[in-house]
Image (cartoon, rainbow, N blue to C red):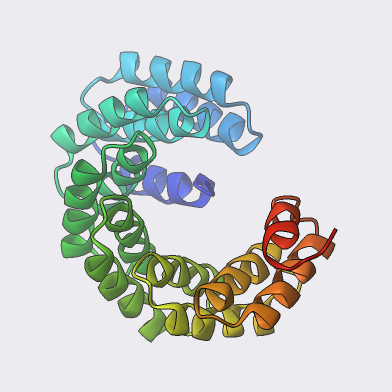
Amino acid sequence: MRTLLNITFIILVFKFSPVYSQSGDYYLSSGLTKHGQNNFAGAIADFTMAIQANPMNATPYYCRGLSKAEINDHKGAIEDFTRSLNLKPLDPHAFFYRGISNHKAGENRAAIIDFTKSAEIDPQNMETYFYRALAKHSLGDYVGAINDFNRVLEKDEFNVKFLYSRSLTKYEMRDFGGTIFDLNTVIELSPNNKDAFHFRGMAFMRSGKTVNGCADLQKARELGDKSALDIIRDKCSVP
């Protein structure tokens, strides 16, 4: 998660606020440096010191939440983002990252609420709709997920990540033609994407186009997809 730029922006917003203390400034800056160096344990310790210096400042809670998320402590991250939001209720970034932690913790309904709130405050952040789509997909709301994927692809129609993710949702909906359509573009843009070849191969198979499917699965195997071999042996008459 590339969060350092976000953290740097936030500190500029809060640095000169009247609730900001000199010692809090030191520990927050130190935490930012350590976070940027992937020293997340050290960053968490510094952000904790910044909180102790000024517990009414939302920024160090937010930053500590980001560092906790990096080490997959999503429960702790959610708690810190919530504390940050209690102090700064209209921060779209805190809603966004709490949504990501909720999603990764399997709390997808809570994640959708967070992403929706973030989008209401900052409707220009396309990543919000993308992650909300992932949360909807996880809940089986494939139509809702497709709607969100469509929204982000209207702004960035050749984004490999968005196209690939939408193709997986279409696959779950048994829209194999739509899956193939999206993955054609993914493969044009990312010709060594083994996952795209794998799922396009599976979509061809499910569409009754075994020859095309076997060719894609063989390509996926050549690119390092070990899971393709069993399917090839089972479906493609290959020893």
Above or below, 6 relative to 52: below
Name which residue lies at 73% across and 68% down. Answer: 236
Q: Is residue 140 left or right of residue 176?
A: left
Q: Is residue 103 left or right of residue 221?
A: left
Q: Is residue 86 left or right of residue 74?
A: left
* Rendered location of residue 49, percent (x, y): 41, 15
* Rendered location of residue 210, percent (x, y): 64, 78
Location of the C terminus by quadrant is bottom right
Asked where in the image residue 170 lies, by quadrant, the reply is: bottom left
Residue 108 appears in view: yes
Residue closer to the observer: 77 or 87 = 77
Residue closer to the observer: 171 or 15 = 171
* Rendered location of residue 222, percent (x, y): 84, 64
Name which residue lies at 48% across and 21% down. Answer: 44
Above or below, 116 relative to 209: above
Name which residue lies at 48% across and 25% down. Answer: 26
